[in-house]
Image (spheres, grey):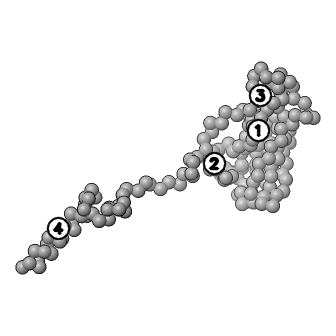
Amino acid sequence: MNRPVSMLCLCAVLAGCSGGGSGLNPMRWFGGGAPKKPQSLEPKGGYRTVDDKRLPVPQILSARWEPTTEGRLLVVTAIAPTKGWWNVEMITQTPQPTGRTRPDADGILRLRLVGLPPPPGSPAAREIARPETDMLTVAFPISNAALATMDQVTVSAANNAVSLKV
């Protein structure tokens, strides 16, 4: 008689432990049953947003490929109407995770050439840029793995764009 009663009590206690909010559940005693954060495919630091305050550089003069050991270097030469442009960079038109370069669905990698003009009223803002001395040269590295997925690269500026076959 004692054995069936003790078995019933044991079953009742174990059934009580299985409740989701029960403090008697041994699976939750050391944080093992704590709710876990859902996993996300979002990269560390989140996706880059297009809140860049830089302006498009007015005109691209040329673009060329330079070979590297791990891919190619896209070198773009541009000119601005005044001296003093700074923080010039090629950025992707569509936000991408840091360290990745992927073309759009049509196989074209679209880049924008952007930079910051000199502060208004500064001496550099009043001087007209001279093509002999005030060229803006920017490079963008692309790995062989990324090059294998694209057919063309297009770099756009404020007044023109340049396309290169891969």
Q: Residues within 10 Å of mark 1 (few under 14, many from 20)?
A: many
Q: Nearer the viewer, mark 3 or mark 2?
A: 3
Q: How far is the residue under mark 2 from the one under mark 1? A: 19 Å
| Quadrant (top left/top right/bottom left/bottom right) for the N terminus | bottom left
Residue type pointed to by label 1: Val
The residue wearing badge 3 is 118
The residue wearing badge 1 is 88
Label 3 sits on a secondary structure element that is: loop
Asked whether, in this view, residue 33 is left or right of residue 123, the answer is left
> Which circle's residue, 3 or 1, is located before the other in the chain?
1
Q: Residue at coordinates 74% horizontally, 32% vertically from top-left?
A: 116
Residue 160: percent from the left, percent from the top?
79, 36
> Which circle's residue, 2 or 1, is located before the other in the chain?
1
The quarter holding residue 38 reads bottom left
The residue wearing badge 2 is 96
Q: How far is the residue under mark 3 from the one under mark 2? A: 28 Å
> Which circle's residue, 4 or 3, is located before the other in the chain?
4
The quarter holding residue 72 reads bottom right
Q: Is residue 159 visible?
A: no
